[in-house]
């Protein structure tokens, strides 16, 4: 019967998990950071535009007789900007999840250790190797699933943020045109 050197295997697997997390972050980190920068930029623009238009809306609206359509365009733009902010917060939350890939893999060490402790002696080295590979695969998959989900969700949330911001800007431009065109 072949015995497993459990302390040595645990040490090697812990190092491998750390290296894997580092490698994943090295490969995808630049992409996640650029997504984070884009989200923060649009978030800043959206917040500034929303705050500015809310602050000066009384000045816009008191200076002229404003039609219902003009008010609708302003409120619609505010709504799209607000939804863009919500999409940004959702994207930022999931981007934060992506940057915590190291802890996600680190937290799986106890699972690996407990599974390694349950490995019984096998007849061949190949059987031991297969058992270790199964443990690694299952545990890696469990650590990677939330990361994969956050990657997809942050990607779509950023897209929604851009679309909502664009629609908000378009309706704000419509508001501006209607305001300029309205009688004094």
Image (cartoon, rainbow, N blue to C red):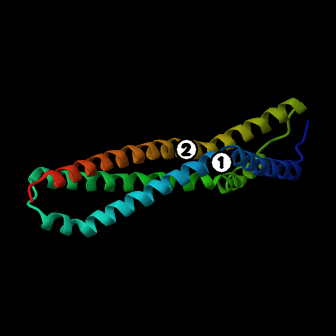
- Position of residue 151 measured from the top left corner of the image (x, y, whole percent): 55, 44
Depth check: give the residue in front, 128 or 137.
137
- Position of residue 127 measured from the top left corner of the image (x, y, whole percent): 83, 31
Residue depicted at x 10% and y 58%: 66
Residue depicted at x 42% and y 58%: 45
Badge 2 is on which residue? 151
Q: Is residue 76 left or right of residue 144?
A: left
Q: Is residue 177 left or right of residue 85?
A: left
- Pointer 1 and pointer 2: residues touching (CB < 8 Å)? no
Q: Is residue 53 above or below residue 130?
A: below
Task: Tell me the SS state at disc 1.
Answer: helix
Task: Tell me the SS state at disc 2.
Answer: helix
Badge 1 is on which residue? 30
Q: Is residue 41 left or right of residue 179?
A: right
Residue depicted at x 29% and y 46%: 170
Q: Which of the 4 quarters of the picture holds residue 102?
A: bottom right
Depth check: give the residue in front, 138 or 173.
173
Q: Nearer the viewer, mark 1 or mark 2?
A: 1
Depth check: give the residue in front, 52 or 163.
52
């Amino acid at each position: 019967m072949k015995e497993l050197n459990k302390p040595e295997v645990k040490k090697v697997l812990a190092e491998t998990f750390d290296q894997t997390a580092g490698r994943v972050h090295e490969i995808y980190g630049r992409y996640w950071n650029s997504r984070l920068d884009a989200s923060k930029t649009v978030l800043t623009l959206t917040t500034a535009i929303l705050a500015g238009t809310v602050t000066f809306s009384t000045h816009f609206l008191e200076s002229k007789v404003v039609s219902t359509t003009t008010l609708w365009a302003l409120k619609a733009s505010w709504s799209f900007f607000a939804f863009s902010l919500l999409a940004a917060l959702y994207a930022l939350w999931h981007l934060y999840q992506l940057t915590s890939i190291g802890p996600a893999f680190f937290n799986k060490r106890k699972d690996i250790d407990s599974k390694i402790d349950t490995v019984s002696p096998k007849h061949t080295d190949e059987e031991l190797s297969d058992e270790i590979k199964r443990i690694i695969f299952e545990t890696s998959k469990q650590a990677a699933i939330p990361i994969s989900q956050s990657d997809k969700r942050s990607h779509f949330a950023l897209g929604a943020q851009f679309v909502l911001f664009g629609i908000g800007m378009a309706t704000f431009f419509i508001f501006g045109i209607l305001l300029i065109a309205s009688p004094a």
